[in-house]
Image (cartoon, rainbow, N blue to C red):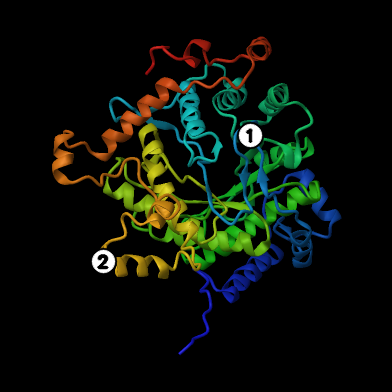
Amino acid sequence: MKKEQTRLAWPLSVSEIEQVHHTALDILEKIGMGKPPEELKALALEKGCTISNEGRLCFPRTLIEDILSKCIPRTVLPSRGGAPVQLDDGFAHFGHIGVAPSVVDFETGEYRDSTLVDLYDLNRLFDALPGMSTGDVPVSATNISDPGSVGVNTLYAILAATNKHAIVDMADQDQLEPMIQLLEMIIGKDKKGIDSPVTFIYCPTTSPLNYEKKYMSMCLDVVKKGYPVTPLIAPMAGAAAPATLAGALAMTVAEALGVLAAVQMQSPGHPTMLGVWPFVADLHTGGFAGGAAEEPLLSAAAAQMIKWYGIEGTVPSGMTDSKLIDAQSGYEKGISVALAALGGGTFVGEAAGMQGSLMGASFEAFVLDQDMLSYINRLQRGIAVNEETLGFSMIADVVKQGIGNFLYHPLTMKYMRSEYEYPQFADRTMINQWKAKGKPDIRQKAREKTRKLLCEHYPAYIDPDLDARIRKTFNIELNTEDMRPKCGRW
């Protein structure tokens, strides 16, 4: 009997998505956003917003809906020569996004303060790893001697190490102008808006429901200069957001829409990815629990909301609480990244490499996690169903000829690459073969691959003459000796 099939929405039905949306509009209209910067307040009042008795900026729901209806989705993240990120191709893309204060030392396995060279080296890895779609700021460069040049040095280290699309933190207000100057020396002054190979990220709210004045003002400055921005709205359920997952989602969406409205009021049609990043607290300790089962539920739901709005965006995943590359790390990352991707995430951040609840970046974990990302990419492709793949003729050939298996059938050879994914590091050998190789474990193989990449992959994405001019203009603390093969660091 033929049954009518319907695709199940996960984790939210369309009706539940609409309920979250209407609650977010109620929050913005009846509670509002606190601490708006003066320039935003002036813009918003002109558009029909009001100030409540508590001094909060309240948005009419019709204004938010009008802004949403006029948003132009950002469909491509251009690069300076690498592959662009095609956000509208129906698949999740993976990157990092976020700043850890430590690295897991490659040699000792200990957590230590991260350095400018670590930032450069990690972006060299991102440049070489196919699963990483962008370059970005996985760690803070804690050893920069001039605090006023942190932004310029961070931007330089990324652009020197990769020509993929770069996602860069804004740093501080007084550093924004030199960062833009450096950026335009490298990419020119005409690649702005949708053509920009760089996106600025920022955390423009302090939850619950307050703007972070400094970063919101900086965001508006970047928008005025024509560069794309991506807000990261990341309250923790049970701490700075309601403990109920639906409530945490609704409040996070409300804050994200409040920031989206600010950007669009400043520059209608400005390319903006929506960063809806609801986090989860461990209610036993009150601390962040990135590996919690509830995290991928919220991330997938956030991805559904972004898609429903017709805007491309980013959600988080892969945020294991394990301090080591172990079974806990594997299952927490694998489950959360897979569910965020299959739930509709367009750009999944924190998807690889991070350990210890985002406190440490691990070189070999970024490399090892490529196996996981390749598996998830295979899941996203699904099952191709057509006359040939259904295999009637294949089955008839093998059965009628009495061969007994399909290993040597021509269609097996034809489809062995497109139908199957083969891991780089997971061990599928027989036990005797594994013993003969010295019983290697998965981390050992990842370390060997990581060391090889870091020894050999020293790209030159900034022309030497331009590099010399940059170093005369700015206090660049990344030594040129550390940016070439056989420098002795690896």
Which residue in the protein does label 1 denote? 170
Secondary element at image label 2 = loop
Residue type at mark 1?
Met
Q: Is residue 266 left or right of residue 159?
A: right
Could you tell me residue 467's position as x and y percent? Answer: 64, 14
Whether the residues at callouts 1 and 2 have beta carbons within 8 Å, the answer is no
Which residue in the protein does label 2 denote? 402
Q: Nearer the viewer, residue 393 or 183?
A: 393
Please name the residue shown 51% across and 80% down the image. 5
Looking at the picture, does residue 429 appear above or below residue 240?
above
Q: Is residue 147 left or right of residue 439?
A: right
Could you tell me residue 457's position as x and y percent? Answer: 46, 23
Please name the residue shown 64% across and 35% down the image. 79
Could you tell me residue 451's position as x and y percent? Answer: 36, 25
Q: Quadrant of the C terminus?
A: top left
Q: Which mark is residue 156?
A: none
Quadrant assignment, res 164: top right
Within-10-Å neighbours for mark 2: few <14, some 14–19, many 20+: few
Is residue 281 something one can see in this rendering? Answer: no
Please name the residue shown 77% across and 62% down the image. 69
